[in-house]
Image: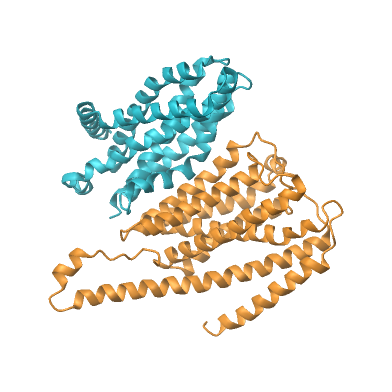
Chain colours: A cyan, B orange
Amino acid sequence: MRLFWSITLATLTKDIRLEWRSKDALNAMLFFSLLVVVIFVFSFDPLAEESRHIVGGLVWIAFLFAAMVALNQTWARELRNQVLDGYRVSPAPATALFVAKVLGNFLLVSLLEALMAPLFVIFYNLRVLGPAWQLIPVALLGTWALVVNGTFFAAMSLRTRSRELMLPLLLFPVSIPAVIGMVAATTSILTGDDPAHFYIVLLLTYDVVFTTACLALFETVLQAE
Amino acid sequence: MKKAFPILVVLTTILLGYAFYQALWVAPTDSLQGDVYRIIYYHVPSAWTAFLLFFINFIASVQYLANAKPSTKRAARWVVIVIGVIGAVAPFIPQVKQQLPTGMYPSSVATTVLIIAGLYFVIGKYFPGQSLDLLAVTSAEVGVVFCTIVLITGPIWARPVWGIWWAPGDIRLTSTLVLWLIYVSYLVLRRFSDSAQTQKLAAVLAVFGALDVPLVYFSIWFFRTQHPQPVIGGGGSMDPRMLHVLLISWMAFLCFAFLVCWSRYGLEKLRREVEEAEALESLLEPGGPTTQTSQSKVPLSRSPQ
């Protein structure tokens, strides 16, 4: 178990260091989601009351598409110099690599959300009517849901033609229940109409089910070549 | 086997014609909806057939993954046996019995679970090794076609009866649509994947899709459903004459689906044999083996172009 975490930590720090030095993915994601926010403001021009109802969907659409940038480069980076092949033949557990990649993406997308959230508040004149602290578990669980399956499917689409196009095609259908959960939870917190507990439980269930499935099947996907 | 195919074609044609005649002329007209309800004889059988095919795809995929190692193969068998035993006994326990929706009998639930568990072993026996994957492709492709029929006939019926084409957030509509989306992405993966391991990746995706469906169902739990209650096991009631026609129609659809699956299965098998033969030929070519084989991967798993 100690070995598992030391491998995970080593891969994670390597990825963070790479990202810190280049900042490629983060900059692209930030600018992309900023564009989504601005374009939606221009196309809808909503009142404060209306924006409360639509912003839940908007936020998550922006993050979902922006996360594709981070997810697509997760494994593509390892293809250079046959790093992934080296990993495949090494005795290190495949799941350690997977966990490291998921944590790396999770940190990256969470950082993006933390930076983008104030912008949404400014552009849409948001004022939360429900219990605002619940937005934090929703954001954490929602991001995990996107990232865990996204990392898994990114590894799967590695072996396909037009890889970057493939990832959303695989990820979005499976993510639909998570997206429903995130959007409904965010909307109900923003409007304060209904309690969001049901959707938080849904997201938690989704996360548990798919994290287990990913961990169980990742070795198969990594070795499939 | 080859002689049976034309016989089945004739039988299916007769059955489809008979079902069509029954649906349009024999079945009584619905007192509330009028004749428009008759689309049910195409909508419901297609839905049942599609779900059955997706289920076969799921079983074949799980078995394909489990067969990779002898240890997981054995474990999967025991899991299926345990599920079968629990499913056959549990519905008769009073506490569980109360949880069942009205119109669903414990015996029918137990039989269904036993049939499901049995299907796992039947498929495992008759489709060993790579033919499991052949079965998975075939059932997914034909299932998507039937699911498309469901999604087209549904709105055609809904427009005159509900006044709207589509009810967003409806539990049955949404879960069928998501199922369709998942299986389309499954077929896309198969088409785009180059490696010889597509079978494995596709099987993994099928398992993810199967895990997703209950969650979709759960996620829209709160929404009311406009969809009529299921005819069987859902508390919906139906004129016995209508039910009779519906079952005949389903039989015809099942025969039709079986026929299409059969020919698609044969075609896919043939295509793989041709590819293998070509790969072998390129190996045996004089002067070719080293340069040829390292350059061209054997695209064992690509769908026909």
- The structure residue drawn at horizontal position 52% and vertical position 72%, both measured from the top left corner, is B262
The image position of residue B163, as x and y in percent, is 74, 45
| The quarter of the displayed image where residue B72 is located | bottom left
In-front residue for pair B248/A77:
A77
Which residue does the image show at 40% across and 58% down from the upper left? B190
Please provide percent x and percent y for residue A185. 55, 26
Q: Residue at x 19, y 64 (%)?
A: B295
Q: Residue furthest bottom?
A: B3
Image location of residue A191, percent across then percent down: 59, 20
Spot the residue most to the front: A42
Q: Is A176 displayed left or right of B46 in the figure?
A: left
Of the pair B269 and A93, the residue shown nearer to us: B269
Which residue of the protein is positioned furthest toward the right in this rendering? B31
Quadrant of image for the C terminus of chain B: bottom left
Work out whether B165 lies above or below A17. Answer: below
B22 vs A220, nearest the viewer = B22
Residue B247, percent across and down? 73, 64
State whether residue A138 is above or below residue B208.
Answer: above
Left or right of B244 on screen, residue B201 = left
Q: Looking at the picture, does residue B26 appear above or below residue A117?
A: below
Give the total of numbered labels. 0
Q: Quadrant of residue A31?
A: top left
Residue B69 visible (yes or no): no
Instruction: Answer with left or right where residue A31 lies relative to residue B29.
Output: left
Residue A117 visible, this orientation: yes
